[in-house]
Amino acid sequence: MSRVDELAAELAKAIVESEEYKDFLRCKEEISKNPQLYQAVNELRRHNFELQNTEGVADMYEEVVRIFDKYAYIRTNVVANQFLRAELSVCRMIQDIQRTLIEDMDFDVDFLG
């Protein structure tokens, strides 16, 4: 196993042992107790993911508002909101890791802008 592979495994372990990830798992367990709510939250997550990964949306702001208006009832549910916040926390942690990797490497990502 290469040094990079070892460090990647160590990083994965650190993420799994982080408070953010533990909170996410706790929230996932809690929301899973209500299958209808979990299904609705997953529908919101799917629409949000598709929007973020779709090019050529005429008015991105308007589309985000439309999705969040459609699922506003979910955001008022304490369990659903805690789950979504915990997921966002884990995602931000992973984004920060990715940003650190890209910034410390001579890796050209100008094509993204």
Image: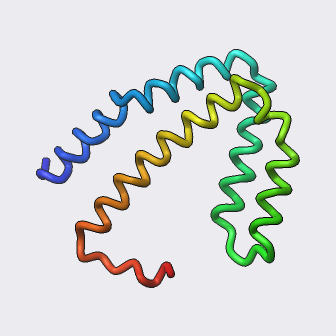
Work out whether residue 52 or residue 9 is closer to the camera in this orientation and state it.
52
Q: Could you say which is closer to the camera, residue 2 or residue 103?
A: 103
Vertical side of 71 occupied by 30: above or below:
above
Measured from the top left, where is residue 112 in percent x and y?
49, 79
Determine whether 71 is above or below 34 in the image. below
Q: Is residue 18 above or below residue 31?
A: below
Decide if residue 104 is on the left or right side of residue 108: left
> Coloring scheme of the render?
rainbow
Left or right: where does residue 28 sit relative to residue 31?
left
Q: Is residue 104 left or right of residue 54?
A: left
Instruction: Give residue 63's position: percent from left, percent from top.
Output: 81, 63
- x 20%, y 49%: residue: 5
Residue furthest bottom in the image? 111
Where residue 55 appears, as percent x and y from the top left, is: 68, 74
Q: What residue is at 85 percent from the left and 35 percent from the top?
A: 73
In the image, is residue 73 above or below residue 99? Answer: above
| Number of numbered discs on residues | 0
Quadrant in the rendering for residue 32: top right
Closer to us: 31 or 74: 74
Q: Residue at x 75, y 44 (%)?
A: 44
At 73% from the left and 28% from the top, the residue drawn is: 38
Q: Position of residue 68 (x, y in %)?
A: 80, 49
